[in-house]
Amino acid sequence: MVIIFDGNKRKEEILNSLKPRIERIRRKGRNPKLSIINVGKNPASLSYIKMKTQALKKLNLEYELYDFEKIEEKDLIELIRELNEKDTNGILVQMPLPNYLNAKKILNEIEPLKDVDCLTEKNLGKLMYNDETIAPCTPKGIIDILENEKIELEGKEVVIVNNSILIGKPLSIMLTNRFATVTLCHVKTKDLKEHTSKADILITATGVPKLIKSEHIKKGVVLIDAGFAKVDEKPVGDVDFEGVKDLCSFITPTPGGVGPMTVAMLVKNLITCTELQLGLND
């Protein structure tokens, strides 16, 4: 029988586990604070920002939201530089940014010790050395799902349908660090089914509704759906959930699967960044 993952339940477990660390920080006279920068009105971004701020409120953590319809690149960089010097403990630039902005240039302006999304070159590079002290939120959440559910990774065939700097690339490194055999698929992959049908673990994050159907998977697969889109104003993932679930041994739904885990890992990264800044990372 298929196991359907409950991301909200696991998120609450993680947030509750952070409370002693938060109290230790408060005893030092600080309350972790996150600065969120959003540009534009991307539906997925707005949904995630709402989830993130709700989680921060629940733990009585501080946050501020800089929400822009449009902003010049130089002004956005100047804001990040100001935040680097202020008492905020984490800086998050909500991705994706509009195409007219140079995401790489902007993200690398963030002080690495405040980079809660782990998107600076310095922090991403640490993953290559198996240093996951701060790791990208969605990949970190996916790893937590797999490890907490005791899903074997060593020697397993893992296929990731996403090669972005946000998910696919860092996740492939983190899985390789755990001795999985990883294949990355993307828009130029010639025969997607040829790869996905061999996967012991299939992870997809394209934002294309019902991209993954029953013919794309083998029986008993572990299926992680990190996609997000809206169809008729309802959130959906990459997977034809009803069409594939009975073929899976384990599956994450959308909503209520990977999304809450991304939020939990953001809060966890904020706490870690604050501890590092205060010298409490023992």
Image (cartoon, grey):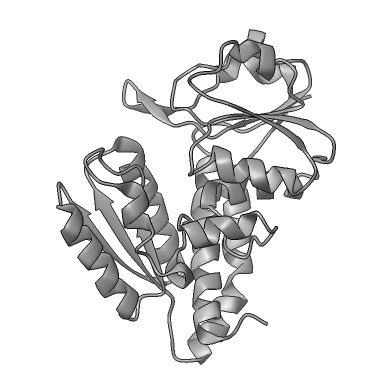
Quarter of the image holding residue 249? top right
Quarter of the image holding residue 1? top right
Q: Is residue 237 visible?
A: yes
User: Residue 278 versus residue 23: which sits nearer the camera?
Assistant: 278
> In x, y percent, where is residue 13?
63, 58
Residue at the image position 75 percent from the left and 48 percent from the top: 147
Q: Is residue 111 above or below residue 207?
A: below
Q: Is residue 6 above or below residue 2?
A: below
> In x, y percent, where is residue 18?
59, 69
Left or right of 257, for residue 151: right
Q: Is residue 257 visible?
A: no
Residue that extends furthest to the top in the rendered view of this protein: 215
The quarter of the picture where the C terminus appears is bottom right
Residue at the image position 57 percent from the left and 20 percent from the top: 241
Q: Is residue 151 above or below residue 215?
A: below
> In x, y percent, where is residue 144?
67, 50
Left or right of 122, for residue 200: right
> In x, y percent, where is residue 31?
43, 80
Give the total number of marks visible in the rendering: 0
Left or right of 32, for residue 87: left
Residue at the image position 59 percent from the left and 77 percent from the top: 21
Residue at the image position 56 percent from the left and 49 percent from the top: 261
Q: Is residue 155 above or below residue 71?
A: above
